[in-house]
C-alpha cells in the first residue's frame, strides 16, 4: 500500500506543480481588464507665416495636430493669449476667440486667422490641449508695418 501511495504521489507531482504555477500566474494579475492606451501625446505643426502685418490686415495660420497614436476618443481644444499689441484670432468664419477661453477644435488640420488691430508689434500664444491633459504651446510674433 505504501508503494502504491508513493507511485501515486510521484505521478501527480507534475499535475500539482502545473496547478500551483497556473494559480500563482492568475492570482498575480491585479486587474481583470486589458490595459489599453488611449492617451497619446501630440505635436503641433505650423506652416510658415508672414512676420509682418499692417493694421487691419489678416494673416492665415495653418496648423496640424499630429498625435503619436490613433484614438477616436481624443478631443482637442484651443485657447490663446495676446500679450503685445491688439488683434483678433478666429477659426474660419467663426466669431473671434476671447483670450483664455477654451474652444473645441473639430479637425486635426485647421486654419486660424489673425487680424491686426494695432500699429505696434504683436505677440500672442496659442495653446492646444486634449482631453487627457496633454498641451502644446505655439508662439507668434508679428512686426507692424505701415502701408
Image (spheres, rainbow, N blue to C red):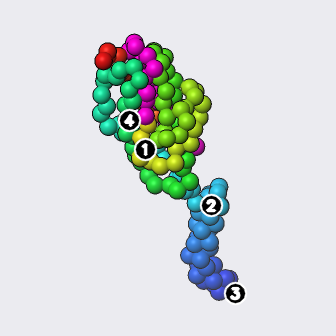
- Nearest to the observer: residue 102 or residue 15: 102
| Quarter of the image that includes the N terminus | bottom right
Q: Given contact means CB atoms under 8 Å apart, are the residues at marks 2 and 3 in contact?
A: no
Q: Position of residue 66 (x, y in %)?
A: 40, 46
**Of labels 3 and 1, the one closer to you:** 1
Q: Secondary structure at mark 1?
A: strand
**Of labels 2 and 3, the one closer to you:** 2
N-terminal label among 4 and 1: 4
Q: Given contact means CB atoms under 8 Å apart, are the residues at marks 4 and 1 in contact?
A: no
| Residue 134 seen in this snapshot | no
Cα separation, mark 4 vs mark 2, equals 43 Å
Query: Which residue: 62% across, 61% down?
Result: 33
Location of residue 144 (image quadrant): top left
N-terminal label among 4 and 3: 3
Cα separation, mark 1 vs mark 2, equals 37 Å
Q: Is residue 93 left or right of residue 22?
A: left
Q: Secondary structure at mark 4?
A: strand
Q: Which residue is mark 1?
A: 110
Amino acid at each position: 500500500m505504501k508503494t502504491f501511495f508513493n507511485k501515486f504521489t510521484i505521478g501527480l507531482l507534475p499535475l500539482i506543480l502545473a496547478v500551483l504555477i497556473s494559480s500563482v500566474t492568475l492570482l498575480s494579475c491585479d486587474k481583470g481588464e486589458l490595459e489599453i492606451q488611449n492617451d497619446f501625446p501630440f505635436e503641433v505643426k505650423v506652416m510658415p507665416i508672414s512676420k509682418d502685418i499692417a493694421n487691419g490686415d489678416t494673416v492665415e495660420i495653418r496648423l496640424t495636430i499630429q498625435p503619436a497614436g490613433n484614438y477616436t476618443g481624443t478631443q482637442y481644444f484651443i485657447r490663446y493669449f495676446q500679450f503685445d499689441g491688439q488683434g483678433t484670432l478666429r477659426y474660419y468664419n467663426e466669431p473671434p476667440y476671447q483670450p483664455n477661453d477654451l474652444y473645441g477644435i473639430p479637425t486635426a488640420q485647421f486654419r486660424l486667422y489673425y487680424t491686426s488691430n494695432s500699429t505696434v508689434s504683436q505677440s500672442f500664444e496659442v495653446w492646444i490641449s486634449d482631453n487627457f491633459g496633454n498641451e502644446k504651446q505655439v508662439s507668434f510674433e508679428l512686426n507692424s508695418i505701415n502701408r
